[in-house]
Image (cartoon, rainbow, N blue to C red):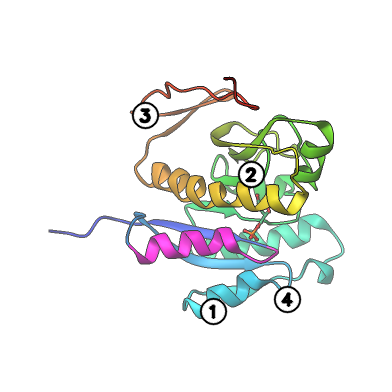
Amino acid sequence: MTPKKKLRLAILASGSGSNLQSIIDQCQQERLDAEISLVISNNPAAGALERAKQAGINNICINHRKFDMREEFDQAVVAALKEVGAELVVLAGFMRIISDVFLQAFPQKIINIHPALLPSFPGLQVQQKAIEYGAKFSGCTVHFVDGGVDTGPIIVQAVVPVFADDCADTLSARILEQEHKIYPQAIQWFAEGRVKIEGRQVKIENSGTLKSTLINPPTR
Ligand code: GRF
């Protein structure tokens, strides 16, 4: 039997890289029909680069501080992505805003994960913001990247409860656990060719229908 063709991923990360790790793990366990062809960080001290090294994955740092303009930095990133033939660009805690140069080079091929239930709480420090607002649920969202901040079409979301005694760290940890599930799942849907964009809506072919609902605090 000829082996299945694997989707070529490039992962961009600025920080610790726990989402990157979850994707590495699932690739290694052959639970994803995907391979990571390159990890890029803009931050030389990113834990993500270390994780890529440990896993023997091609990795580079493109330090944004060495570029005068956002577009020049993005051009360098795009050149590196094209060189490895990236088919899906996965932002995993990548703390840079993407310019048109980047978006136009990979139309509908860039995805991001955000630690809130979009369109609520876009931007930064969103776990703290959800707590301060008094939200009873938060969660995470995998979405396409467009020209706005966390505004692109939504692919999948996971919901977690917010507890009365939560702080940003406890809520972040609860959300992160779900991030590590839904990001690899979304990538697998891409690998299977099941992700269809229809305007603002994203349809996952043959995904089934969720039947349950959640109430927090629980009713008797
Ligand atoms: C995650 O919470 C992700 O949702 C956000 O940045 C964080 C990255 O965490 N975009 P890690 O580097 O993957 O651990």
Q: What residue do we see at 47% from left, 43% from top?
A: 186
Question: Where is residue 67, by image quadrant?
Answer: bottom right
Neighbour tally class for label 3: few under 14, some 14-19, many 20 plus, Cα within 10 Å: few
Q: What residue do we see at 50% from left, 45% from top?
A: 182
Query: Gap in Å between the C-alphas at discs 2 and 3?
Result: 26 Å
Can you identify the residue that label 2 sits on?
A: 104
Query: For disc 4, does the CB lie below 8 Å from ligand 1?
Result: no
Query: Gap in Å between the C-alphas at discs 1 and 3?
Result: 35 Å
Q: State the image coordinates of residue 137 (x, y, percent, origin top left).
A: 66, 32
Q: Are marks 1 and 3 in contact (CB under 8 Å)?
A: no
Q: Tell me which secondary structure the magenta stretch mostly adopts.
A: helix
Q: Is residue 104 left or right of residue 182?
A: right
Direction left: furthest residue: 1
Q: Of the residues under marks 1 and 2, which one precedes in the sequence?
A: 1
Q: Quadrant of ligand 1?
A: bottom right
Q: Are marks 2 and 4 in contact (CB under 8 Å)?
A: no
Whether residue 13 is visible to the viewer of this picture, yes or no, is yes
The answer to whether residue 28 is above or below residue 190 is: below
- Position of the N terminus, as image quadrant, is bottom left
Q: Secondary structure at mark 1?
A: helix
Can you identify the residue that label 1 sits on?
A: 53
